Amino acid sequence: MSAVEQAAPAVTIPEIGQPFGGGFFSGITRDPDTGKRYLNITAGAEHELKGAWGEYVKIEGADSFTNSRANTEAMAAAGSELAQKVLALDIGGFTDWAIPARDVQELQYRHFKPTTEENWAGRRDGDNPNSEPVGLLYSEESPGQTPLTAFQEGGAEAFRDTWYWSSSQRSAYGAFSLYFDDGTQGDYAKDDELRVRPVRSQLLQ
């Protein structure tokens, strides 16, 4: 074994839903610009917030589908109270929480789907080129309800059967969001009040 290999021990990738890094491991994404891979961690249900995404303004730096933190910092700098609240979170000693970017949020539904409802499968819902493995279009049956009891409907960590914000901006007027009843990926007007389940990311060496 080389000195370099000895200095860089292998990272053990957690199981989906395993407690990890202040929350629960929810999957891997790859930055399309740098190629770097990241472990994504979803906060527990007790840390959910609700509020408006922001004002009807095009925000520079809030367009990434993978960089949740950069999006959220851009939102906060532009005056988003919701983003500011998420950035102020300290969960388990970790202070780098963010509103999930679109493709990070997709992993939350793919792995933590709370309901047994059929998925909405009429558009591009489920398409996730930046996840590992690459996310494919949803069918009515796939993904199914999560096998993780805590995340199933009524469980302590379950997502609610409602819309959640992502931090990925679609236009000056709307941002991407996801309906956790059937996986519909759409967008809402920025002044609507939706829920947020915070995330943080950790570089996978």
Image (cartoon, rainbow, N blue to C red):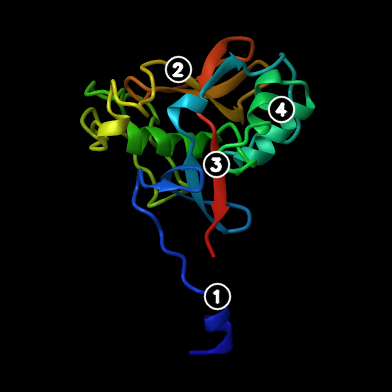
Which residue is drawn at the image coordinates 68% and 17% (left, top)? 54
- Give the secondary structure at mark 2: strand
Residue at (71% x, 21% y) in the render: 80
Q: CA distance from mark 3 to mark 4?
A: 24 Å
Residue placed at 27% from the left, 28% from the top? 152
Marks 2 and 4 close (CB-CB < 8 Å) = no
SS for dot 1: loop
Q: Which residue is mark 4?
A: 75
The earlier-in-sequence mark between 3 and 4 is 4
Q: Which residue is mark 1?
A: 8
Vertical relation: 177 (above or below) 137: above
- Compared to residue 89, the image places residue 25 above or below, namely below
* x and y, in percent, of residue 85 in the image: 66, 25
What amino acid is labelled 2 in the image?
A: Trp
Q: Which mark is residue 92?
A: 3
What residue do we see at 41% from left, 63% from top? 12
Q: Position of residue 131 (x, y in %)?
A: 44, 48
